[in-house]
Amino acid sequence: MKNLAEVKFLDRMESFSIHSLLLALFFLCIRDLRISFSQQGICSAPSILDSPPLYWKATNPTLSPAHLRELPGFTRSVYGKDHALITPESHVFSPLPDWINTLGAYLITPPMGSHFVMYLAKMQENSKSGLPPSDVERFLFVLQGVVTLSIMSGINHELEVDSYAYLPPNLEHSLKSDNFATLIVFERRHAHLENHMADLIVGSTDKQSLLETPGEVFELRKLLPTSLAYDFNIHIMDFQPGEFLNVKEVHYNQHGLLILEGQGIYRLGNSWYPVEAGDAIWMAPFVPQWYGALGKTRSRYLLYKDVNRNPLL
């Protein structure tokens, strides 16, 4: 049997252990808070009342699977003869030609087999765009920040997140940003049709009406007019979790795609790829393609599609 002194000693040791454990947990919490504040800034600490900005995952993507993020050499990017998946960990940024204080990452270019380019433009403080080459049309969509579109006629447009602009070929214009902004940009040499003139278009996704999609469940918006003056269109397609394309598409049109929100599975050819916000895809003519949305939130992507032109031309 333990004497009274031994019992008191054991009680003190048990109390000391509990206090030590609580103190250790307290310092761990303090350390985590310091790390959080150092990464985000004390004024930007997350709040359950704050909602993240639109498309924040497209400009701040995660890499999946999570346990491979730090594995040297790991990437989900794939390049093939009829499709490519370019994921954010593979982006290579360099100064954009003729742009000021702007870094660009080309995601789709003609050497792949495309007749258009698709690139990310990261505008820094006091940045300004250059002009595309002669006879090249440009479409831009704002993913982050605010940019000012100035037309040489003296007209200015403030473009915020989810806003876009189509610039006809040879239109004098500039894009300026006082702070950080991210754009997705498409450019291609315009396939002009006689007696059909493309006009400047400025708009935002939420101002575009939903279009009918017979036999499908996804929501569709077209950002450009469907008239013959335009040789491509940009579609915004929304899928709720579990929704998918009914048609397993195989067609002559080329596609350039950027996932803006959510995650899912994309079939390209005979391969099936997990995809998420921030991923870019190129699809050559006649590659089998299909998409199904996964996760718990809406899936949205932006899609380039060439239209209104005879494939022989």
Image (tube, rainbow, N blue to C red):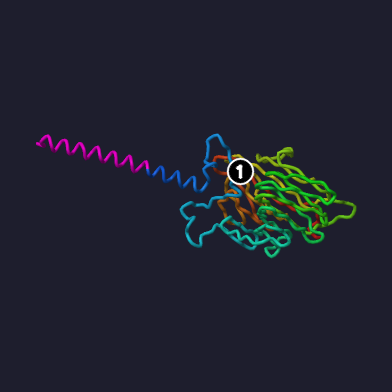
- For the stretch drawn in magenta, what is the main secondary structure? helix
Quadrant position of residue 211: top right
Q: Dot 1: few (<14), some (14–19), or many (≥20) neighbours within 10 Å?
A: many
Q: Quadrant of the C terminus?
A: bottom right
Number of numbered discs on residues: 1
Residue occupying the point 66% across, 49% down:
179
- Left or right: residue 77 compared with residue 21: right
Which percent across, then down, holds residue 289?
64, 52
- Observer-nearest residue: 180 or 275? 180
* Left or right: 293, with 214 as reference point: left
For residue 65, above or below residue 160? below
Query: Could you tell me the amino acid type at mark 1?
Result: Ser
**Residue drawn 83% across the image and 52% down it:** 152
Q: Quadrant of residue 89?
A: bottom right
In this rendered view, identify the residue nearer to me: 250 or 68. Answer: 68
Residue receiving disc 1: 299
- Which portion, as a residue range, is magenta? 1-26
Kindly give the residue lying farthest to the right in the view shown.
Answer: 195
At x 81%, y 61%, the residue is: 134
Instruction: Inspect the magenta stretch and tell me whether residue 14 lies in it.
Output: yes
Q: Position of residue 274 (x, y in %)?
A: 55, 51
Give the answer, above or below, for where 191 lies relative to 48.
Answer: below
Q: Position of residue 310 (x, y in %)?
A: 81, 56
- The answer to whether residue 273 is above or below residue 214 is below
Q: Considering depth in this image, is 256 or 67 the residue closer to the camera?
A: 67
Q: Secondary structure under badge 1? A: strand
Instruction: Please state the horizontal and vertical placement of residue 75, each as a whole percent of the image.
Output: 54, 59
Tell me the quarter of the image containing the N terminus.
top left
- State the image quarter where residue 220 is shown: top right
Out of 103 and 268, give the one closest to the viewer.
Answer: 103
